[in-house]
Amino acid sequence: MITTSVDNPRPGRELFHLTWPMLFGVLALMSYQLVDSAFIGQLGVQPLAALGFTVPLQMLIIGVQVGIGIATTAIISRVLGADDPARARRLAGLVVISGASLIAVLALAIWLGRGLIIQSLGGSDKLMPTIDAYWAPWVVAAWLGAVLYFGYSICRSHGDTKLPGAMMVITSLINVGLDPLFIFVFDWGIAGAAWATIVAFSTGTLIVYTKILRREWLTFILDDLPIKPALAQLGSMAGPAMLSQLMPPIAAILATGLVATYGEAAVGAWGLGTRLEFFSLVTVLALTMSMPPMIGRYVGANRPDRVEVLVWLAVRFVIGLQLGIAILWLLLSGILSPLLASDPAVQNHLHDYLLRVPLSYGGLGVCMMMVSSCNAMGLPMRALTISILRLFLCFLPLLWLGSQIGGLTGLFTGALAGNLAAGVTAWILYKQGLKHLHQQLGKTEEQTGKA
């Protein structure tokens, strides 16, 4: 873990050292998901449509687990800072038990309600056999992924980013290696992709928790831990963070329902485009994991000016990087479309998507970083407000308006405009929050001086 003075004149270098382990790990995860999509894309329109309907539900589960993970890292780090490793171990055990139970209930609800979910999203009855075959192993894989993620959060709270980063790479390689075997050789079809993920996540969970237990970072003996106060503390921190994380999947569910009105080929293309979006934003995701510890240290040292420097540096980097990625997807759109999908209709829709939506990834990246920064600044409700406004003020209204004006192509243009508007809105709210932080810390210094 990198520890430097808050007056470090090169915060960018420090940010790099904190980010790169997570960057490679998240990149590996996104790469295997993209390869997954490519293999499934060769199976035809219905498996791709099933994948498209799965993406928003997957984002829902990930939103819950990430919200719990944010609270886990914050609480355990604080307890370790108070030199109470025994309590930290018990809190880690409580997080794993309660988090795994919550995700299990959510996964079971999705499985039992799959018919109603697909119907509400605009899917046809003929798609249900494919959904049944895929979602049975997929919900198990989603639960295992959440349990593994809680292990990663415990590692990060102890300052270890190398083990999570390495395991993300290893599990991704296992998944990619097993995909063609399970999907094509064993002829399990789309369900084979989920079974490959189960094997990969099971391997990762076994390795990570073995190391955590060996390092004495986790215990399931909770006799000396007041359960209700500990759960209340976890919930008070996880609640706003979880709600912020749930906004994107809610947007994805509603957007998928709108896209579904244009047919299964459109849903398949939208699902592939969403996977490409995940891949494109890998650096932003890594930054949202590495920036909060730095921002928290600056706030703790009453240096909001350093927060401003750090965030502005990251924003400029993300906008430039995402513009370059958008140009790359634009140049490769004619190659990627037939590579990722065999159906001509899906290829045409995906080509239209790649000509428009990636140009807005810079705005979306800024929005994601502002949510993370506001949480780290101690402004969780402002972070939640940014997420809500992105959903109800920017993205969905412009998505709908674009579809009314120009059909599916107009919908893609609306997604572009919505992401850009979300970025601008998030930046304005962050600046207002930074001003509030300046005033708050100024009052604290004044009261300290009088005392």
Image: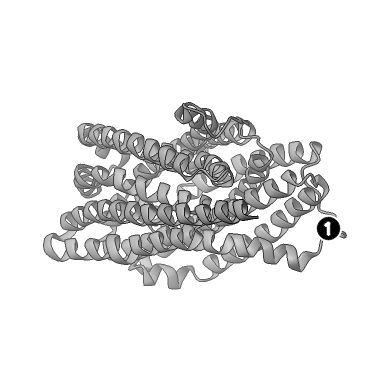
Seen from the viewer's position, the closer of residues 78 and 157 is 78
Under circle 1, the secondary element is: loop
Q: Is residue 9 left or right of residue 426?
A: right
Q: Is residue 308 left or right of residue 44?
A: right
Quadrant where the N terminus is found in the figure: top right
Quadrant where the C terminus is found in the figure: bottom right
Q: Residue at x 73, y 49 (%)?
A: 79
Seen from the viewer's position, the closer of residues 451 and 302 is 451
Q: Residue at x 81, y 40 (%)?
A: 216
Going by the numbered disc 1, the residue's amino acid type is Leu
Q: Residue at x 38, y 35 (%)?
A: 313
Q: Position of residue 119 (x, y in %)?
A: 38, 71
Q: Is residue 197 above or below residue 451?
A: above
Q: Is residue 24 left or right of residue 401?
A: right
Provide the residue designation for mark 1. Answer: 222
Q: Residue at x 39, y 59 (%)?
A: 386
Q: Position of residue 438 (x, y in %)?
A: 46, 52
Q: Going by the picture, which residue comes out furthest to the left?
A: 405
